[in-house]
C-alpha cells in the first residue's frame, strides 16, 4: 500500500516536472510582453540563488549569511573579467562560479569551527566584509556609483539556430532557463547522492553522523563551496542580464530574500524552494503599488513562517497529502465494513 | 602627538562603553535563551528615536527623554519576546534566529515608513559644549555617554550578582529545568531579562543619538558590532563582554592610524575572526557550549 502510494507520488512529480518544463519553454510565446518574460528570467536567477542557500541551510542545517555577498562575488567577478580583460562571458561564467566557490570555501574554513548562532554571526561578518570591499574598492568596482554598461553574453553559434545574440530578452530567458534546469538537476542529484545523505545526516544529528564515520567538517565545507558556486553562477547571470550592478544589491540584508524563499518553500525541499522563489519574484512586481511595503511584508512573513509553517510550503503540502491519505484509508475501511 | 593618541584613546573608551552597554543586553538574553537577537539593533534605534521625539519635539529635558527611551525600548523588547520568541521557545535552534532577522527587517522598514528616510539631527545642548581635561578636550555629550554607560555597566553587574532577580537569571541561565524545580518562574525571568536588556539598548540609542545621525537603519552597524563583542567576550559572560566591548572601541579608534576610514566597520569582524581562530571559546569561557 505504502509502496504504491510512493510510486504514485513519484509519477506525479515526474508529470508535474515535465508539464512545468513545457510551460517554461512555451512562456515566451504565452506571455505578451517582454516585461513579464523578464520577471520569469529573474525568477530563474533567484531559484539558482535560493537552491544554493538550500544546500547549506536546507540540507545541512547551517545558517550561512554571506550568501548575498557571494552572489555579489559572482556578479563582480564575471562583469569585471569581461569588461577589464575582454574575456568571453562563456569563460567568465565558470570562472566566477569557481571564484565564488573559493571565497565560500575560505569563509567556511574560518567559520565552520562554530555552530548554530555563532556560525550565523561569523558568516554575517564575512558578508559585511565582502560588501565593504564592493563599496570601498572604488578603483575596481566603482563603489556606490554602480558598475554599468556590462555587456550581454557574447553571441555563440548554436546548431540549427545559427549565431545567437543575447541582446534579445528571449535568448537571455532561454539561457537562464537552461542554467536553472541544470541547477535543479544538480541539486536533486546532490540531495539523493551519498553527499546528500551525509549532509542530511549532519543536519539531523552532527554527533551521530561523526560517530557513523562521516567526516563532518569536510562535508560542511563542501556544502559551503557548492552553495557558493550556485551563488556565483546566479551572480554572473544577473550581472550580464541586468547589465548594471551596485554594492547595495549584495548587502547582508539582501540574503533575507533568499532566506525567505528557502524557509517558506520548506527547508531542504527543492520543489518548495522553486515555487517560493517564483512566487517571491513575481508577487512584489505584480503588486507595484505595494512596493513600499515589500520589506515590511518580507520581515513579517519570515516570522509567520517560522512560527506557523516551520516546514514551509513543502511541509504543509505533505501534511495535506497525509491527511488526504488517512481520509482515503478511512473511507476504504468504512466501505470494507459495509 | 601624545595629545592625538590620548584623544584617540578617550574616544575609543567612549565608543567602547556604548558597544558594551548594547552588547550586554544581547549577552543576557543569550545566556538565558541561547538566542542571538538580530532585532536588538532595532530596539537601539527605537530608543534613539523615542529620545529624539521626546527631547526635540515634545521639549522634555534630556534625562527624562532618556528615561522615555528606556521605557520605549523595554516595551519594544517585551513585545518582540511575547509575539515572536515565546511561541518559538521549543522550536529548533535556528528558528528564533531566522525569525529575529525577520523582526529586524520588519522594524527597519516600518520605521522607514513611519519616520521617513530623512536622517534627523538629535542636537542636545551638550553636543557643542566642550570640556577640557588636562591636555585633551571633548564634547560634553561624549562625557555624558561615557559616564552613564560606566554607571550602567557597574549597576548591571550588581543587579546580576546580588539581587533576587539577578540570581534567578543566573540560575535559569545555568540550568533552566533545575531553576524551575526550585520554584523560579522562568517566564518572568525571561521577561525581566528582555526588559533590562532592551532598556540598556534604548539608553545606548538615546545617548549616542546626538553623536550619530538618526536613521531607520542605524541599528545595523551597532548590532553587528555587538554580536562581535558578545562572541569575542565568550558565551554569555558579562566580564568578557565588557572587556571585548572596550577592546573593540579602542581598536577601532586607533584603527584610523593604519587602515582607511571606510574600512573601520570591518575591524569588528577581523577581530572576531582572529579571536575565533586563536580561542574559539572567546576571551572568558563562561560555559563550554555546543557552539564550538
Image (spheres, rainbow, N blue to C red):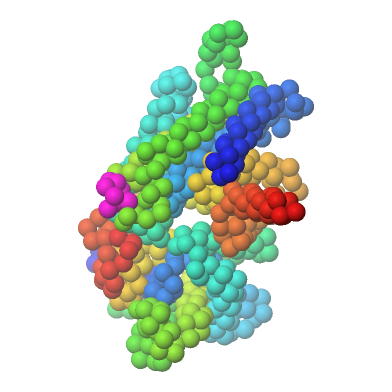
Left-right relation of B48 to A93: right
Q: Is residue A196 visible?
A: yes
Q: How many marks?
A: 0
Q: Nearer the viewer, residue B12 or B21?
A: B21
Left-right relation of A268 to A133: right
Query: Which x, y percent locates residue B247?
Result: 29, 67
At x 47%, y 77%, the residue is B197
Above or below residue B195? Residue A168 is above
Above or below residue B280? Residue A325 is above
Q: Nearer the viewer, residue B252 or A334?
A: A334
Quick check: is A269 in the magenta stretch?
Answer: no
Q: Which quarter of the figure has residue B120?
A: bottom right
Query: Which x, y percent locates residue A24?
Result: 65, 28
**What segment is highlighted magenta in the picture?**
A209-216
Q: Which quarter of the figure has residue A114?
A: bottom left
At x 26%, y 60%, the residue is B280
Q: Quadrant of the C terminus of chain A?
A: bottom right
At x 41%, y 86%, the residue is B181
Query: Which x, y percent locates residue B286?
Result: 28, 73
Q: Is residue B273 visible?
A: no
Q: Quadrant of the N terminus of chain A?
A: top right
Query: Which x, y percent locates residue A28?
Result: 70, 24
Q: Quick one: which residue is furthest to the left in this view?
A: B278
At x 58%, y 63%, the residue is A307
Amino acid at each position: 500500500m505504502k509502496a504504491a502510494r510512493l510510486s504514485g507520488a513519484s509519477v506525479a512529480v515526474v508529470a508535474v516536472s515535465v508539464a512545468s518544463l513545457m510551460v517554461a519553454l512555451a512562456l515566451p510565446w504565452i506571455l505578451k510582453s517582454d516585461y513579464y518574460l523578464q520577471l520569469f528570467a529573474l525568477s530563474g536567477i533567484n531559484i539558482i540563488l535560493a537552491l544554493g542557500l538550500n544546500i547549506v541551510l536546507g540540507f545541512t542545517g547551517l545558517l550561512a549569511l554571506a550568501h548575498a555577498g557571494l552572489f555579489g562575488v559572482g556578479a563582480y567577478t564575471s562583469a569585471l573579467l569581461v569588461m577589464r580583460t575582454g574575456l568571453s562571458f562563456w569563460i567568465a561564467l565558470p570562472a566566477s562560479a569557481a571564484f565564488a566557490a573559493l571565497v565560500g570555501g575560505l569563509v567556511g574554513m574560518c567559520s565552520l569551527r562554530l555552530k548554530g548562532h555563532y556560525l550565523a554571526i561569523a558568516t554575517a561578518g564575512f558578508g559585511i566584509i565582502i560588501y565593504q570591499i564592493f563599496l570601498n574598492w572604488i578603483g575596481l568596482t566603482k563603489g556606490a556609483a554602480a558598475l554599468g554598461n556590462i555587456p550581454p553574453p557574447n553571441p555563440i553559434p548554436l546548431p540549427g539556430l545559427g549565431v545567437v545574440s543575447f541582446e534579445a530578452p528571449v535568448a537571455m530567458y532561454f539561457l537562464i532557463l537552461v542554467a536553472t534546469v541544470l541547477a535543479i538537476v544538480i541539486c536533486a542529484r546532490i540531495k539523493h547522492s551519498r553527499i546528500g545523505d551525509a549532509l542530511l545526516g549532519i543536519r539531523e544529528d552532527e554527533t551521530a553522523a561523526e560517530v557513523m564515520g562521516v567526516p563532518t567538517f569536510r562535508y560542511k565545507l563542501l556544502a559551503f563551496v557548492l552553495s557558493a558556486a550556485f551563488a556565483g553562477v546566479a551572480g554572473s547571470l544577473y550581472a550580464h542580464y541586468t547589465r548594471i550592478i551596485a554594492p547595495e544589491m549584495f548587502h547582508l540584508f539582501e540574503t533575507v530574500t533568499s532566506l525567505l524563499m528557502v524557509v517558506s518553500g520548506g527547508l531542504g525541499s527543492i520543489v518548495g524552494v522553486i515555487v517560493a522563489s517564483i512566487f517571491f519574484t513575481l508577487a512584489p512586481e505584480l503588486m507595484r503599488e505595494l512596493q513600499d511595503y515589500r520589506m515590511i511584508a518580507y520581515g513579517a512573513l519570515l516570522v509567520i513562517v517560522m512560527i506557523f509553517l516551520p516546514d514551509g510550503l513543502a511541509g504543509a503540502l505533505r501534511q495535506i497529502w497525509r491527511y488526504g491519505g488517512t481520509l482515503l484509508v478511512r473511507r476504504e475501511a468504512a466501505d470494507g465494513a459495509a | 602627538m601624545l595629545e592625538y593618541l590620548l584623544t584617540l584613546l578617550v574616544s575609543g573608551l567612549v565608543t567602547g562603553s556604548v558597544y558594551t552597554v548594547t552588547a550586554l543586553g544581547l549577552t543576557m538574553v543569550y545566556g538565558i535563551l541561547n538566542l542571538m537577537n538580530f532585532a536588538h539593533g532595532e530596539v537601539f534605534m527605537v530608543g534613539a528615536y523615542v529620545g529624539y521625539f521626546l527631547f526635540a519635539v515634545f521639549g522634555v529635558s534630556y534625562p527624562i527623554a532618556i528615561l522615555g527611551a528606556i521605557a520605549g525600548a523595554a516595551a519594544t523588547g517585551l513585545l518582540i519576546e511575547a509575539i515572536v520568541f515565546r511561541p518559538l521557545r521549543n522550536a529548533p535552534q535556528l528558528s528564533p534566529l531566522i525569525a529575529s532577522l525577520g523582526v529586524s527587517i520588519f522594524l527597519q522598514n516600518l520605521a522607514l515608513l513611519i519616520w521617513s528616510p530623512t536622517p534627523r539631527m538629535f542636537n542636545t545642548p551638550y553636543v557643542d559644549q566642550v570640556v577640557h581635561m588636562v591636555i585633551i578636550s571633548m564634547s560634553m555629550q561624549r562625557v555624558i555617554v561615557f559616564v552613564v554607560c560606566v554607571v550602567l555597566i557597574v549597576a548591571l553587574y550588581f543587579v546580576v550578582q546580588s539581587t533576587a532577580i539577578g540570581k534567578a537569571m543566573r540560575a535559569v541561565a545555568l540550568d533552566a529545568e533545575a531553576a524551575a524545580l526550585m520554584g523560579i518562574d522562568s517566564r518572568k525571568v525571561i521577561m525581566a531579562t528582555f526588559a533590562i536588556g532592551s532598556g540598556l539598548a534604548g539608553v545606548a540609542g538615546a545617548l549616542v543619538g546626538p553623536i550619530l545621525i538618526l536613521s531607520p537603519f542605524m541599528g545595523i552597524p551597532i548590532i553587528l558590532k555587538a554580536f562581535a563583542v558578545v562572541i569575542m567576550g565568550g558565551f554569555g559572560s558579562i566580564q568578557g563582554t565588557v572587556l571585548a566591548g572596550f577592546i573593540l572601541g579602542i581598536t577601532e579608534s586607533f584603527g584610523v592610524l593604519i587602515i582607511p576610514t571606510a574600512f573601520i566597520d570591518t575591524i569588528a569582524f577581523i577581530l572576531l575572526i582572529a579571536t575565533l581562530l586563536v580561542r574559539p571559546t572567546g576571551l572568558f569561557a563562561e560555559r563550554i557550549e555546543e557552539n564550538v
